[in-house]
Each structure stands twice: as structure tokens, then as C-alpha cells.
Image: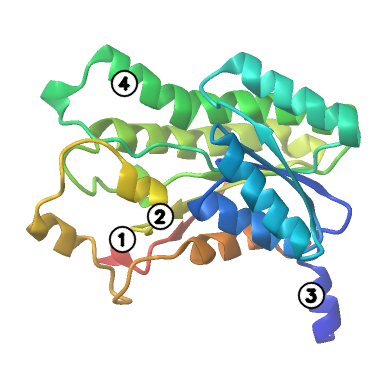
Amino acid sequence: MSLDNHMKLYALDRRVALVTGGAQGMGAAISRLLADAGAHVVIADVQAQKAQDVAVSICESGLSAQSMLLDVADEASIIAVTEAIEREHGRLDILINNAGTQDRNFIEDTTSEYWDRLMAINLRGPALLTREAVRIMRAHNIDGRIVNIASNSAFHASAPSLYAYSTSKAGVAGLTRAAALEVVKDGIRVNAVCPGNTTTEGQMSASGPDFPAEQIAQFAPPVGRTGTPEDIAGAVLFLVGDISSYMTGQTLVIDGGWLTC
């Protein structure tokens, strides 16, 4: 097979992709790469101006994107955005459940309000978005692709104070497998990317207790550097492209080898 044919396995021409949390960090990098592969990307975020700035930047490069206001903790907002995409484009081919929060709290400081808010963003939001995306994909006979951004914390407790966060990401890994089984008969594939320590604006601005220096040292993976948003975007492109057509229900860990330590 020629290199040109190989590249076609990554091509996303005429596909419509929804990227949640696309205003910055991993979401912005994913949005740019999917647009570069030919998709029309809907950048959905609670930070409306930053999402619009990313969309404008993509369009200025001659690619296709738009922004929408989305609060993944609000079911009405989720339904409004997905219905708007269906109404405007008549389809939704790709959903990237990227929006999330890494706010921290120790067990004894975890209130029910804090727990519920984090779960609403990190777990309930992806579940509801998956529901709405599957509805559209089934209605239009689309062989859809859903990629959830989980974490290597789903498989290994990485630090104190990530009690709720790690639990939510373990839930995302479970959601991925359960959804994949239910929609495989429709030709819809559902997979997850599990980043390790990746430097993003969201990570730096997360609330909660600071990590002590000795804990930070333990985050260093064998490859000798932290991850970048582009590292994660590359894995997402692989999972939404035809090159991974035999993969579903999988959790792809991208953490520089940290879980091997």
C-alpha cells in the first residue's frame, strides 16, 4: 500500500466533529488536528470567547471550524448543542468527550457538593453527550466515532487529593467499554485515551491542595518529560480514523510509560 493510501486512513473529509472543552489545552490541540485532517470541528466550551478564538484561528488557516457555548454539567446545554449540530449539519460523525476538571480535595474535605460537581463534569457529562451523539448517529446511519478522555489515574492512584478525580476517570473507562458494547451493532466505535501527566492550562489552574515536591517528582515518566496536548491529539486522530477500524471498547494509555514503573 502506498503512503498516500495510508494517509487516507487518517482523513476525516466531510465529517462533523464535536470537541468538548475545546477552548484550550488538549481540546484545542485535538480540534486543530481534526480540522487539519479535513473535519468540520465544533469547538464547544463554557469559555465562549476562548472557544471562538480557537475556531477563528483554525478558519484563518483555511480549515473549517465553529464554536458553541456548552456547559457539560448542564443536560439542557448538552441537548441544545447536539440538536443545533444536527439541525445545521444534518449529522454528527465524531464526538470527543474532552471537557473535564482536575480540582483536588482530600477525602476528609470532600463535600457532597464538590463530589457531585466534579462527577457532573467528568462523568455524567460524557455519558449524556454519548447518549445524544448515539441518537444522531443512529438516526442518520452514521458509523460514528466516540473518544473519551480518561486518565491513567483510572488504573493507578497517582496522588493523594485526587480521590474524586481518579474515581470519575475510572468511571469514564467503564463508560467507554459499556457504550462500545451497546453500539457496536450500529457501526459506532467507542474508545478512550488515558493521558498521564500532561501540561495544560486546566491542570495548572485546578483548585485544591498543592502537590509536595516529592510527589511531583514521582509524576515523571520513563521518557523523561511530561506530555503535551499534541501527544494526546495524535492518539485521538488515530482512534477516529479508519486506520483503527478494528478497535472499540479500548483504553489507550498515553503516559510516557508511567504505568510501567
Which residue does the image show at 13% across and 55% down from the upper left?
215
Q: Amino acid at mark 3?
A: Met
Q: Could you say where residue 67 lies in the image, as x and y percent from the top left?
A: 70, 40
Q: Nearer the viewer, residue 29 or 56?
A: 56
Q: Amino acid at mark 4?
A: Trp
Mark toward the viewer: 1 or 2: 2
Mark 4 surroundings within 10 Å by alpha-carbon count, few (fewer than 14), some (14 through 19), many (20 or more): some
**Measured Cα–Cα span from mark 4 to mark 3:** 43 Å
Q: Position of residue 162 (x, y in %)?
A: 24, 38
Q: Which badge, 4 or 1, comes first in the chain's sequence? A: 4
Foreground residue among 227 and 141: 227
At label 2, counting other C-alpha atoms closer than 10 Å, the crowd grade (few under 14, some 14-19, many 20 or more) is some
Mark 3 sits on what residue? 7
Q: Earlier in the sequence, mark 1 or mark 3?
A: 3
Q: Position of residue 97 (x, y in %)?
A: 58, 39
Q: Give the labeled residue for mark 2.
A: 200
Q: Secondary structure at mark 3?
A: helix
Q: Which residue is mark 4?
A: 115
Q: Earlier in the sequence, mark 3 or mark 2?
A: 3
CA distance for labels 1 and 3: 31 Å
**Residue linked to disc 1:** 259
In this rendering, the answer to whether 182 lies above or below 255 is above
Q: For the point 23% across and 60% down, which residue is it?
A: 219
The front one of 212 and 139 is 212
How far apart, in angstroms, are the residues tagged by discs 4 and 1? Answer: 26 Å
Among the 4 quarters of the image, the one containing residue 5? bottom right
Q: Of label 2 and label 4, which has the lower sequence position?
A: 4
Q: Does the residue at mark 3 contact the one at mark 2 (Cβ under 8 Å)?
A: no
The x and y percentages for residue 201 are 40, 51
